[in-house]
Structures are given as C-alpha cells and as structure tokens.
Image (cartoon, rainbow, N blue to C red):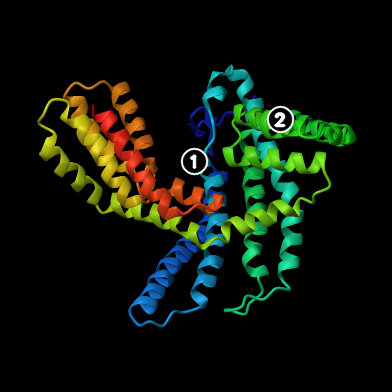
Amino acid sequence: MTSRDPTTSEFNGVQTLPTDSQLSRDLSRWMMPIEVLCATLMVGIVLMLFGGVIARYVFSHPVGWIDEAVSLSFIWVAMLGAVLAMHRNEHLRLTMFVDKIPAQWRGLIHAFALVAISAFLIGLIGPSIEHVESEWMVTSPALEIPSGIRVSAIAAGMILMLLVIGAYALKTVSKKNLFIAIIGVGLFVTFCFGIAPQLKELGMINILIFLCGLVFFCLVAGVPIAFCFGIGVMSYLAFTGSIPLVVIVGRIDEGMGNIVLVSVPIFVLLGCVLDATGMGKAIVDFLASLIGHVKAGMSYVLLASLFIVSGISGSKVSDMATVAPALFPEMRRRGNKKSEMVALLATGAAMADTVPPSIVLIVLGSVAGVSIAGLFESGFFVAMVLLMALLV
C-alpha cells in the first residue's frame, strides 16, 4: 500500500507530492532555477519574435539568426517545462478508472505508473545522448554553434524527469509496492524480449498489441497520456523490429524543431496575461450587462464568453479559468445547478476548441502538413455552427 503522510495531498485520486515535507521543500528549491530559466527563455522568445517582426516589416531588414535562436529556446522550454509539470503532477492523465479501483490496490497501481514512466525515460536516455553526439558535429548556419546544444535539451529533460520520479516514488510509495511494480515491469520486458522472434512474425498485429492494448492498459493505470503513447511506440520498436530507439528521439527533435509550434506557449502566456490583468473578467462583465438580464441569459453569457476569450488566448484552460470564477457565483445565485453549469462549461470549451487561434489546430496543421490558415477558416465556421446549436 502507499505510505500515508499527513501532509500528502491527492489530485483526482492520484497522490501528489507532499505539500509540507522535507522532500517537497528540497524539490521546490531545486526546481526554482529551472522555473527561472524557463521564464527567462519565454521572455527571450517573445522579445526575439517581436524584434524580428519589427526588423522585417518596419525596417525591411530581416534578422536571419532569430529563427534559430527561437527554435533553440523553444526546445529547452518544452523539455524543462515537462520536468516542472512532472514535479507538479500536471501531466494530463486519465483517472476515471483509477478512482474506481479499491483503495487497497491504488498504491500498487500508482507504483506501476511511476515505474512504467521511469522505464520509458531510462530507455530513451541512451538514445538521447547518442543523438546529441551525432548532432554535435553539425553546425547551425546562422548562429554557427553546434546543433548538439539544442538537442541536449532532450537528454537533460529525460534525466531530470527521471530524478524527480525517483524522489517522488521513494517518498510516496511503499517499498513493497515499488518492489512488486519493478518486478512486474521487469518480467514484462524480459518476456517480450524472449518472444521477440515470434512477435516479429505477427506483423501488423503488433500494432494492436502495443499501440492499442498496451497504451490502453497504461491509460487505465493512470500513466500520463503522453507517456502512454511513448511507451507503446518504444515497446513496438524495441520488441518487434530492428529500428533503433534513437529514431524516437529524432522524431521528438523534429517535432519540436518546427517554429510554428512556438505559438503554443505564447498563446498560453497570452491566456495567463488575460486572466492576471482582469481583461477576461471585463469581457465577461460586459456580456453579462448586455444579455444577462434575459431568460437563461447567464448561460448565453457563458457560451459567448468562451467563444470570444478563446479567440484571444487559444488556451482552453486559461479560458475556463477566466470565465468560470466570474460567472459561476452569479449563476448559482440565480438557481442554476452545479452539474448543469459544469456540463455547459465543458461543452462550451469543446465548442470553442476550434476558434482561431486554436492550439489543437496549430499542432494538427504542423504534424499533418495541412494549411493552418485553412484550418483556422474552417474551424471558425465549425465553432459558429456549434455555438448556434448550443444557444438554441
């Protein structure tokens, strides 16, 4: 069973780091430089992009090294941000099944999730270092620095996440459950390596085994969603073929090397600014004074606010954090049920997910090679149709 600490908190049924323990204080102290570095890099990205726009469109003198500097900063922000998210237990995970498991088994499931993540990170640390060594011989054309400086962020992120998980597991998981989880994962890996020749003969069936079955099992166990797919892909490549795992690291590097994805953290930052400065609340208050007095007016205000705010920030988390605190108290005062308000908020957020600028559409366009401008145009009309349907 999971060791219980009086200061240990829970998030959606999954234990988080203790809030008032020596471990929490030590980790927070070690995380502080990473937080400062991430914030500094984000400020640098914003300033460089702003300077690049001014130089290109005002002075007609584009600066060639800005794209490379932004790409370098972005991959470091992404990997160090993953470390911070691991420390704060903010990686998205599916807890619906974990919450329904009897309490006496949750500790073991929690231990398995941590060991599975650790196995994935350990499996990619070696290929990450190998990728850094191969890229160190390549020099960037504008900055004239080794490309290994940029891709070393991947190896650094893997190592730091492994250290955070190790410290977390030693404090929050009992030795018995941790030992059982390690043995279980070790037996699974050994068994798969032992039957690797038979797995290769199965051909495409392995996709169902690893990319569907194993991924689903990890999702049920509460493993963060990103790591579920990573574990499935790594297992498929390691047990069923001769493709080296460095290919995964190369795909990670290629994915985060796309300059278009830099817009994602910038839109999230814009959503935080919208929430912190009170601009979002001002929009909500204006709509409430405009149509809030009609029948079911606050529901209309909620949907319209999500639609408008989504067109500014692009981050649904920031949108809901801006709209819900401003409207829910008044909606409760007018007799709305809490379940209905939450359902309307979730449905409205799904509706507004395609309102430009949409992080989902940006990532989809970047990965699939589809025109992002075209996705924005079609997404706007889709969101308008859904908005009209919800209003009716």
First in residue order: circle 2 vs circle 1: 1
- The total number of labels drawn is 2
Provide the residue designation for mark 2: 208
Who is closer to the viewer here, 252 or 27?
252
Q: Secondary structure at mark 1?
A: loop
Expressed as whole percent of the image width and height from the top left, the position of residue 389 reads: 28, 29
How far apart are labels 2 and 1 at the CA level? 44 Å
Q: Amino acid at mark 2?
A: Leu
For the point 45% across and 45% down, which residue is it? 360
Q: Amino acid at mark 1?
A: Asp
Q: From what the image shows, is residue 93 above or below residue 100?
A: below
Provide the residue designation for mark 1: 20
Expressed as whole percent of the image width and height from the top left, the position of residue 38 reads: 49, 60
Q: With 40 as the anchor, is 144 left or right in this view?
A: right
Q: Secondary structure at mark 2?
A: helix
Q: Is residue 353 visible?
A: yes
Who is closer to the viewer here, 71 or 94?
71
Pick out the residue farthest to the top. Answer: 102
For the point 85% across and 35% down, which residue is it? 190
Q: With 365 as the anchor, is 110 left or right in this view?
A: right
